[in-house]
Amino acid sequence: MKHEESFLKGVRGTKIYSQKWLPEHETKAILLVIHGLAEHSGRYANVVNYFVPLGYAVYALDHIGHGKSEGTRVYVERFEDFTDTIKIYFDMIRESHPDTPIFLVGHSMGALIGAFYLLDHQDELAGSVLSGASVKIPEDISPAIILVGKILSVLAPKMGLIQLEADGVSRDPEVVAAYVNDPLVTIGKYTTRLAAELLRAMKRVTTQASTIHLPLLLLQGSADTIVDPTGAQMLYDTVSSEDKTLKMYEGLYHEVFNEPERAQVLQDMEKWLDRQS
């Protein structure tokens, strides 16, 4: 496979890192991978190594404030900064591959970004795969806490608020160790502004999900402690897609592509993608 790295100009003139992996021969379809909170595009080697030899090209970027991209770490002015940058990147990919089907593949916060993106741009895509989708507002967050969060996002937008628990990423200790020791992963707390924008995006997705109608595959670990696993079921029940599939993997943690059973997850994704062609 061929691997290329580059930078593009995102919203607010931000320098955004991107990379792509191209098959040696004809490209049958493109996977546009959207990574999750506090991580980066380089953590999807299992997806790359599985699908590129099958003829898929994989394109991915680092969100603003993540990985090798510019911006305050795990901070965003407005949630649309994520999706508007994805749109810029998508248009660049489409220009290079005018007739190739493009599938959006989002994980965790990337699945929330992906679902938000689908609300406005789904007709440009052949389908979408959402993994560990962070689309449901946690039940333990009261309206009062949400109000306080909104106030803090204005008064102290870059103050650290919540930290992800690394042990919830995978049951594979090597994956957890690599995550913790990865210099491009932000281990500290993410900001009040980002937290408020995530909640705003979740609210829009949950209230407008019925407008999503493209082919959709949802992948979810039943033992996920980072996002509520019932969010995937909620999304599945709400979207209007005639072609929709929910794969709930018993006992798997948050990153199903990095779990010991990842071969089964990737095979299920391959079968679903094959049905779309």
Image: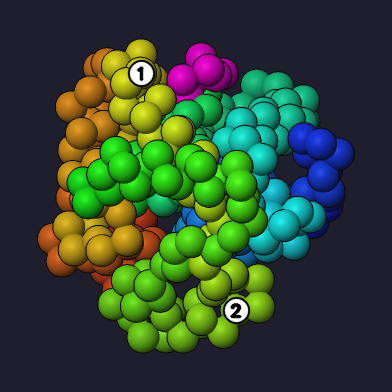
Give the residue pinned by disc 1.
Answer: 208
Q: Earlier in the sequence, mark 2 or mark 1?
A: 2
At x 61% / y 52%, what residue is drawn?
Answer: 156
Rendering quarter of residue 162: bottom left
Residue 90 image-quadrant placement: top right
Camera-side residue of 82 and 163: 163
**Type of amino acid under label 1:** Gln
Q: Residue at the location (47% across, 24% down)?
A: 118
Quadrant for the N terminus, please. Answer: bottom right
> In the rendered image, which residue does mark 2 sit on?
182
**x then y, percent, for residue 209:** 33, 22
Could you say where residue 252 lies in the image, as x and y percent from the top left? Answer: 22, 65
Q: Indicate left or right for 59 with 150 as reference.
A: right
User: Which region of the structure is painted magenta?
Assistant: 118-124
Of badges 2 and 1, the one in the foreground is 1
Secondary structure at badge 2 equals loop
Residue 34 higher or lower than 236, as above or below: below
Indicate yes or no whether the magenta region holds residue 60. Answer: no
Residue type, numbered disc 2: Asp
- Residue at the image point whose x is 22% and y is 51% from the top: 140
Is the residue 155 above or below the residue 50 in the image?
above
- Residue 20 visible in the current orientation: no
Give the x, y percent position of residue 206. Answer: 31, 27
